[in-house]
Image (tube, rainbow, N blue to C red):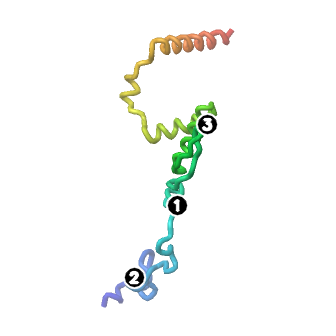
């Protein structure tokens, strides 16, 4: 009775071609226990390695060693390392908008900033002649 009125179409395959109850549509799919990239990366970064620092051997995770290496490059003045380190810090810790707006510069810093801005304005007006 119900089979006579069943209309085959988009999203309604013929009943004889449907999967049987309990049958998977992808029988050879991902095997049980297979690990993804995220799991592999987490496992790899959490492994410990020996690092000699100031003549002493320490055990650090690979993640910690990479962060230390990035910070060391940034401290040596590498602009790409500085940018990456700042990007990571902002992404992980964020910036509180209220705190950023209320932070007061030191008087010497304000003086330097004012001089720099004044010099920039003078240079831009002098180029037009």
Q: Residue 35: image x %, image y %?
A: 50, 66
Q: Which mark is residue 40?
A: 1
Spot occupied by residue 98 in the image (x, y as percentages of width and height): 36, 28
* Residue furthest to the bottom: 1
Disc 3, SS: helix
Q: Earlier in the sequence, mark 2 or mark 3?
A: 2
Earlier in the chain: of badge 1 and badge 3, it is 1
Taking depth in this image into account, of 76 and 1 the one nearest to the observer is: 76
Question: Dot 2 corresponds to which residue?
Answer: 7
Disc 3 designates what residue? 73
Please tell me how crowded label 1 is: few (under 14), some (14-19), or many (20+) other residues with Cα within 10 Å. few
Distance from the alpha carbon under mark 1 to that under mark 3: 27 Å
Residue 19 in percent (x, y) is at 43, 83
| Residue 53 vs residue 65, the one in the foreground | 53
Does dot 2 land on a helix, a strand or a loop? Answer: loop
Separation of marks 2 and 3 at Cα, in angstroms: 68 Å
């Amino acid at each position: 009775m119900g089979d006579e009125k069943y209309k085959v179409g988009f999203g309604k395959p013929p009943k004889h071609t449907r999967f049987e109850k309990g049958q998977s549509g992808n029988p050879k799919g991902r095997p049980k226990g297979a690990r993804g990239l995220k799991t592999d990366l987490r496992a790899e970064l959490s492994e410990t390695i020996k690092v000699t620092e100031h003549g002493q051997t320490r055990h650090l995770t690979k993640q910690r060693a990479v962060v230390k290496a990035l910070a060391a490059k940034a401290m040596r003045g590498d602009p790409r390392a500085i940018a990456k380190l700042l990007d990571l810090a902002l992404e992980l810790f964020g910036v509180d908008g209220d705190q950023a707006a209320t932070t007061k510069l030191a008087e010497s810093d304000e003086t330097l900033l004012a001089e720099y801005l004044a010099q920039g304005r003078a240079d831009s007006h002098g180029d037009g002649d």
